[in-house]
Image (spheres, rainbow, N blue to C red):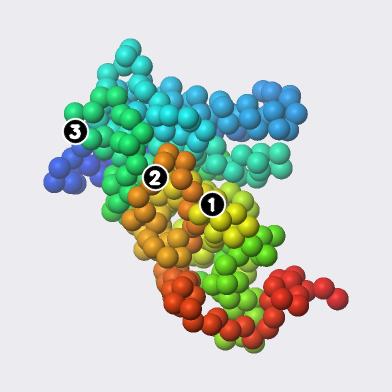
Amino acid sequence: MPHNRTTFSKFIIEDQRRRSNPDPELTALLNDIQTACKFIASAVSRGELDRGAGAGEARGSLRDTATDIMLRECESGGKLCGMVYEGSDAPYRISPDYPQGRYLLVFDALDGSPNLDVNVTVGTIFAVLRAPSGVDSPATADFLLPGTKQIAAGYALYGPTSMLVVTTGAGVHGFTLDREIGAYTLTHPEMRIPSETCEFAIDASNERHWEPPIQHYVQECVDGQAGRRGADFNMRWVDSLVVEVNRILIRGGLFIDPRDTSDASKRGRLHLLYEANPMAMIVEAAGGAASTGRERILDVVPGGLHDRVPVILGSRSEVERLNRLHAEYDRGEALTFKTPLFKERSLFRTV
């Protein structure tokens, strides 16, 4: 094993030292988060060995375990005054047994948990916000901040290897868990998303519910070299946001989880506060872009803890292309198709 690798703890300490206004409390909080991710990685790796329940019960049990780990490890450090997580009815208040900090933490403890049944990579998504001055017991309104107010964001992957990817606003860095020494070590410094790509991820089973701009974009990609794009595209879909974003950071690409027109009351599928916003911060810090199709995700002001939004993120040129298609559609301009996708035939050709 190389002995000169930089551990996550050392990296964030040095990162803060380089800043004009270092924040040791943020350093301590990020260390608490990485500790929680190590425990969750261990629990995920055990799988059915620790449970022996049915598939659905195992999913729920492991999600609850991961949530409890995040709450326990991050609460005791004394740097938080509140948390919000996937499934919470209201902000989680820090126990009076621990000091109250000045940060807020939002997280999805086990993103992609439906994939546990088939042993596909899952992960944790998180973001750190600063609590309003003088607030010791934050209310719901104190969490309803746009993504531009995030001061750190990241995700952990639990797969063939366990990774932790983090940004504090300047660059995105990936760390791999070295189980021999029990530390995340720097393996992917300064991750950057290529501005152009020939790969996109979307759930094609929902094609009938896409808005015309999404239909138009996918048709262009499916037409390949014979179409107006003049290039062949690969299509992916794992239904795990951490996996999709990690692939984009490693080799470029586009992730699309658009508005579903079957239910006008829902703007999108992904939660703004603890899914879309953290990933948007990471993607933008890596040179990519993140949009709803009509506005920058980080500019959206949440109206509730569990608000959902459409998500388009990844290589900047492709996000901008979809933004233009949405703008043209909203202006009433016709989006013409060279082939009758979603009219006489499906995305998937039949003989």
Disc 2 residue type? Gly
Q: Helix or strand or loop: what does disc 3 sit on?
A: loop
Q: Is residue 153 left or right of residue 26?
A: right
Q: Helix or strand or loop: what does disc 1 sit on?
A: loop
Nearer-N-terminus badge (2/3): 3
Q: Position of residue 247 (x, y in %)?
A: 53, 57
Disc 1 residue type? Lys
Residue 171 appears anywhere in the view: yes
Residue 166 appears anywhere in the view: no
Nearer-N-terminus badge (2/1): 1
Residue that numbered label 2 is attached to: 303
Nearer-N-terminus badge (3/1): 3
Label 3: how many Cα within 10 Å (few below 14, some 14–19, many 20+): few
Question: Which residue is at 44% across, 25% downward?
Answer: 71
Residue 266, label in figure: 1
Q: Could you say which quadrant of the image residue 135 lies in? A: top left
**Disc number lying in front (3 or 1):** 1
Which one is in front, 174 or 223? 223
Question: Which residue is at 56% across, 27% downward?
Answer: 64
Q: Residue furthest left?
A: 20
Which one is in front, 214 or 244? 214
Rounded to the nearest angstrom, the CA distance separating label 2 from label 1 is 13 Å
Disc 3 residue type? Ser
Residue that numbered label 3 is attached to: 133
- Marks 3 and 1 in Cβ contact (< 8 Å): no
